Amino acid sequence: MEAKTLAKAKEWLGPEFDETTRKEVQHLMDNDPKELEDAFYIDLEFGTGGLRGLMGPGTNRMNKYTVSMATQGLANYINKEVSGKNKSVAIAHDCRNNSHIFARRAAEVLAANGIKVYLFRELRPTPLLSFAVRHFGCTSGIVVTASHNPKEYNGYKVYWNDGGQIVPPHDKFIIEEVRKVQSPKDVARLDNADLIEIIGSELDELFLNTILKESVHPEAVKAQSDMPIVFTNLHGTGGTLMQPFLKKMGFKNVHSVASQDKPDGNFPTVISPNPEERAALDEALKLGEEMGAEIVLGTDPDADRVGIAVRNFEGKLELLNGNQTATILTYYLLESLKEKGELPANGFVCGTIVTTELMDKIAAHYGVNCHTTLTGFKWIAEKIRNLEGQEKFICGGEESYGFMIGDAARDKDAIVTSGLLCEVAAYAKSKGSSFYEMLVEMYAKFGFYHEALVSATKKGKDGAAEIKAMMEAYRINTPTKLAGSEVLEMRDYKTGEIKNMRTGERRPTGIPGSDVIQFYLADGSKVTARPSGTEPKIKFYFSLSTKISGRQDFEEKKKTMEKRIGELKEAFVNG
């Protein structure tokens, strides 16, 4: 272990740290040098969205001290950026262990710096925090959550006054201020609790009434009000608003998974509370079969992502991926708005560099723009802000089960998304069709796009180094063929360059600034490598497309594409 790392650890034995923390650090010193090194070898990075990491003592961990220091840095920036007394921050938290403690600590630090705080008394979904920032006219916002990460994690996301997560230039300047705070001694102490206003459930109704306006076919919901729906909040915040919203929409036959209703940061019934993983929805799928559900929904702990299952042609519940959810909602909204004569002439939808290109095809058909951003909804929120007064945002999505409809909340929102997904099912049923049939009709109309994702977990200091080495290897030793197909083009969003692999010609991507590499193949395939910004993982995305005539050749083409994706996985990940 480096002497610098050990010295940092010894500092945490000082009097500014509580007795429990000092004992935990001493225990690591005496018994677990590897864990000690990982806890102190770096400071937990306050990245472009905030903090996220394992909970525990140490500079590379989420704890009340790293949260306090990060909040002091944020407070210093707010006080520099905003003059006068009109400075305020809204704070919410999810169900995770210590979330309420971290939220309260952040509120106290801000108040000690003369900044007004709107603190939610109880756990609430992330989209409600974004809505609160806009509603109260706040300077900033904080939500304490690690989203869909395993139970050992927690996090801290920062928002700016438009309700979106921080982006340049604010992120850079906040990071600079956070880095200046070197010790808990630099954190202001609470001396004005009057600046902390506790928020109860009074904002819930206003939020639900606002997002209810996104419904486009309420008559279909009324006609199918008894349609069976199953929902699980996976021990998270979704249960605070989901059932009230579905009831407000008019759905009367909603069943929740009782064993997963109670908020619990230990997530006792799942290995990981991530609706992207099938195992997380096993209990919901079981209840869905028992209840004859038309649709099954599962939200992650902070209710900004939703996974769904619908009945396939064999009548079995089949899980859909995030791209399928994003495209069917985009198709439904644009088609419905056009049918009603309400499609804005200056409308736009948004995807990211790893969202299916089917989004672009659908948008082009309806004459609306489809803007592409870097991965993450903060970039979609930035696009909305930059285009205000020029183009009207309709919806946006990314493959990781996030979607946003309207801009009442400027972050992905599983509440309104779930409601509209249920509306799609009701609308299709009222037309004598089904959700799945509508999905296949969309493919027949615009092209059948099929995607898959592989994630490789690489934990700790060594894992981070391994991921970095993998990405550099793709840049230095760029493959010329993958699974028998020539690589025509490499897009490197870190350097902002697109390289023609045949000619060597280079041109700009137009959206540089992210450690993502994409390979476009001669057979029309696309393969993407991207280190996760929120987990110790590297993610590999695979995408294919083909034409289908409809239901009659859907299954056959699906099997062919799945086989091809398997070959690409083997060549790229394991080769």
Image (cartoon, rainbow, N blue to C red):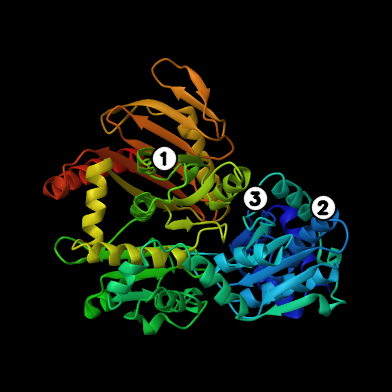
Instruction: Provide the secondary structure element on which disc 1 rests.
Output: strand
Instruction: Provide the secondary structure element on which disc 2 rests.
Output: helix
Residue 99 in view here:
yes
Judge left or right: residue 62 versus residue 561: right
Question: Which residue occupies the foreground of this view, 299 or 465?
Answer: 299
Camera-near label (2 vs 3) is 2
Q: Amino acid at mark 3?
A: Thr
The answer for how far apart the CA atoms under marks 3 and 1 are is 22 Å
Q: Which residue is mark 3?
A: 48
* Residue 393 image point, x, y percent: 52, 49
| Neighbour tally class for label 1: few under 14, some 14-19, many 20 plus, Cα within 10 Å | many
Q: Earlier in the sequence, mark 2 or mark 3?
A: 3
Q: Is residue 175 above or below residue 148?
A: above
* Residue 253 image point, x, y percent: 31, 80
Q: Amino acid at mark 2?
A: Glu
- Give the quadrant of the C terminus: top left
Q: Which residue is mark 1?
A: 528
Q: Earlier in the sequence, mark 2 or mark 1?
A: 2
Residue drawn at (22%, 49%) of the image: 441
| Neighbour tally class for label 3: few under 14, some 14-19, many 20 plus, Cα within 10 Å | some
Furthest residue toward top? 503
Residue drawn at (21%, 38%) of the image: 547
Q: Which residue is mark 2?
A: 81
